[in-house]
Image (cartoon, rainbow, N blue to C red):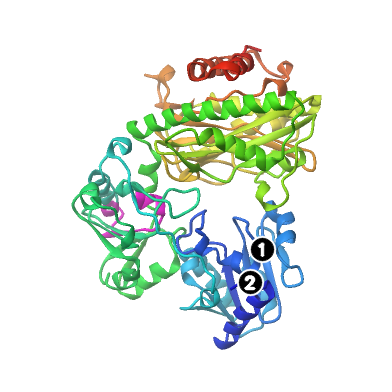
Amino acid sequence: MTTSSLDRLSLVRQELNSANLDAFIVPRADEYLGEYVPECNERLHWLTDFTGSAGMAIVLKQTAAIFIDGRYTVQVKQQVDGNLYQYLSLTDTPQIPWLIEQLESGARVGVDPRLHPLSWLQTAQAQLQRADIELVSVTDNPIDLHWQDRPAAPTAPIILFDQVSAGVSSSEKRAQIGVKIKQAGANCALISALDSFCWLLNIRGSDVPRLPVVLGTALLHSNGDMVLFTDLNKLPQGIEQHVGAGVSFKAETELATALADLNGIKLLADPDNANAWMQVTAQQGGAKLISGQDPVALPKAQKNAAELAGMRASHIRDGVAVSRFLAWLDAEVAMGHLYDEAVLADKLESFRLEDDLYKEPSFDTISATGANAAMCHYNHNNGTPATMTMNSIYLVDSGAQYLDGTTDVTRTIAIGEVTDEQRKMVTLVLKGHIALDQARFPKGTTGQQLDAFARQYLWQHGFDYDHGTGHGVGHFLSVHEGPQRIGKNVNNVAILPGMVLSNEPGYYRADAFGIRIENLVEVRHCEALQGAERESYEFNALTLIPIDARLIDKQLLTQAEVTWFNEYHQRVRETLAPLMQGDELNWLLRVTEAI
């Protein structure tokens, strides 16, 4: 049953009146608090028609507001009725203080505690309490009560991930994490991150778009025993033998009872990333909550030899696919054939689809021409895709989920002639990319300390960019994997061997153009500094795809940077040439010539 946004808003307000609530908060997140949300859990979209990946709506009895970040200021006006919702900034207008201004003393604000982390719930509760406003955790989400045409939950079976590809058995992984749980002073850990329990059990799934995981929640005991609460209909034949002894499976509907039965258990849980309902339920059942980070996150981030081998292999094949697309694009532009952003994104995927190990994109492709590229997280699906024009810049940021690895790469491409100013800006970005790629750093260094390597040349000219420089990447898992990252914000996680991160400085000039150069890199011991006073690490590029030399001002490069550029292209040529042929091979040989 399709209803208007006014009808849906009215239904939620009916529930407010029934429950004696003055407001209800609707985040974009679902119960699993992940970056990606299956269609059946897109509650914010159902209520408001907004399709962005981040946002929050607050419904009051007479008014409503939607909070979005800078990526969606144009999109929100196209999708969400401005007569029903006020448009506000997710970052510049803190939601709880705004709500306090709208309400009077004694008001009651409803939340679904399954859709918020415990830390958020506790902070919101404290802020509201100071204003004499009550935060009420509802049992029945008003949206769930009225979502009549709600899509069915995903039903695809669990994928048994080959142990040869995983490198380590589930039993070994669970024993390893069990030790960490004990070291944290706990008996049991709440494993709520979908990629964490999938990694632990050497399983994958297709429940969430762009993320090959299974919906569920796990409890891992310090002895390595584990219970996974999920849809039992998804269990494939042989899963018990695959995961090894000590693992049991229960229906997700049994999670509440299991949490309530943890009386006397010291439960390790992440207050920032696990939903509040689970932790409060366990606490009310007599469990003692021990606050701590997901114990799986760091071991998962440090890839073993088998995982790194898969990442390297997948990046070579991905390099061929993306290079073939770039060769096609150059040929089409030379013939005057200009396409819109959607056609270009689909064409790029068509080359990846020829790989038997390819499953799906690792995120929605950012296919952006001209001024659209100045929006660093632009999505052509959120409006009418623009058609590229001659004498412009095209930016394509894309990635793939292969059975043996996850990729993410950005290339900025000259379409016809470009200006000296554009060349200057691309070269400044490239210089930062090279500086980070070539960094050597001692054990204990964090991504926050490395971030300035990539920004220094932009800073010297008065420029910068507003996104992080690097994020972790999983092994046939999340393309945005923690806990490590490279960015300005405080992050005390040291960069360690085996981690895979992106190196992606950029520059964005509003209403004009956007630039980003992104490779994935692996962290390894620095061979040149073996035996030095401090144990040191370095990066090694996994991504092997040409960088457009037409956008580079060689005069702005040092000789060492020119050498890096030429050696990188020589490595690309030697690796990809045996796998390409005909006009595509000729293109590769041409664009990887020394500058």
- Answer yes or no: is residue 506 visible: yes
- Answer yes or no: is residue 445 visible: no
Q: Is residue 308 left or right of residue 450?
A: left
Q: Which mark is residue 304?
A: none
Pick whichever, 41 or 2, lies toward us: 2
Pick whichever, 499 or 200, lies toward us: 200
SS of the residue at dot 2? strand
Residues at circles 1 and 2 in contact by the CB criterion of under 8 Å: yes
Q: CA distance from mark 1 to mark 2?
A: 8 Å
Q: Residue 244, percent across and down?
A: 20, 49
The type of residue carrying mark 1 is Phe
Label 2 crowd (10 A; few <14 / some 14-19 / many >=20): many
- What residue does disc 2 label? 58
SS of the residue at dot 1? strand
- At 49% from the left and 43% from the top, the residue drawn is 360
Q: Residue 175, percent across and down?
A: 23, 48
Q: Is residue 400 left or right of residue 261?
A: right
- At 42% from the left and 19% from the top, the residue drawn is 529
- What residue does disc 1 label? 67
* Quarter of the figure with residue 188: bottom left
Magenta stretch in the rendered image: 181-198
The residue lying furthest to the left in this view is 245
- Does the stretch in magenta take in 183? yes
Looking at the rendered image, the quarter that the C terminus falls into is top right
Label 1 crowd (10 A; few <14 / some 14-19 / many >=20): many
